[in-house]
Amino acid sequence: MTTQAKREFRLTGWHVLGIFGGAFAVIIGVNIALAVNAVRTFPGVETKNSYIASQTFDDRRAAQEALGWTVRADATGDRVELAITDAEGKPVQAGQLTATLGRATHVQDDRTPDFTFDGRAYVAQEALAPGNWNIRMTATALDGTPFEQRVVLHIRP
């Protein structure tokens, strides 16, 4: 008759150290992977020097609010419309208007549409995929007052 020696498992200090070190290695590895992906996919820079930009913020905001402009964006088919109205609800034709159309989370879909004023709104030919889009517009009033706004545009599937 053969007898098998029954081997008993013992949890030693080396085992605990290995489990502890392995758990921390997984946590640190996941954190590094998430941080790298976050930095790589989001541009993150709004202004080069926030301190200098903050020095004139209140004055620029007051001048912009004094214009009384309201901005609304719509999209139908392959047409994007950016309507600017004054305090009385009348259409506004800016002296100059530039806009960047893109997603909030990455810059790969960013584009600069060619908006033209049709008498009541600025219109551009752009086919947009469903989802959330941002229009970051910069306009100049006829009196030279700068106007900046980010307009959220939601395209339904």
Image (spheres, grey):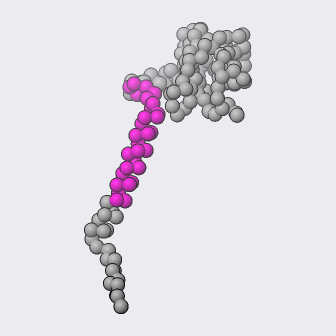
Residue 139 in sight from this viewpoint? no
> Is 30 in the magenta?
yes
- Percent position (x, y) of residue 137? 57, 20
Q: Name the residue at the left extreme.
A: 14
- Percent position (x, y) of residue 71? 65, 23
Span of residues in magenta:
22-50
Residue nearest the observer in this picture, 47 or 109: 109
Q: Name the residue at the bottom extreme.
A: 1
Q: Quadrant of residue 2?
A: bottom left
Q: Viewed as shown, does residue 5 lie left or right of 72?
A: left
Give the residue at x 42% y 36%.
39
Q: Quadrant of residue 16?
A: bottom left
Q: Is residue 145 above or below residue 34?
A: above
Residue 124 in sight from this viewpoint? yes
Q: Quadrant of residue 65?
A: top right
> What predominant SS class does the magenta segment belong to?
helix
Give the residue at x 36% y 51%.
28
Residue nearest the observer in this picture, 90 or 137: 137
> Is 46 in the magenta?
yes
Give the residue at x 34% y 77%.
9
Image quadrant containing the N terminus: bottom left
- Percent position (x, y) of residue 54? 43, 26
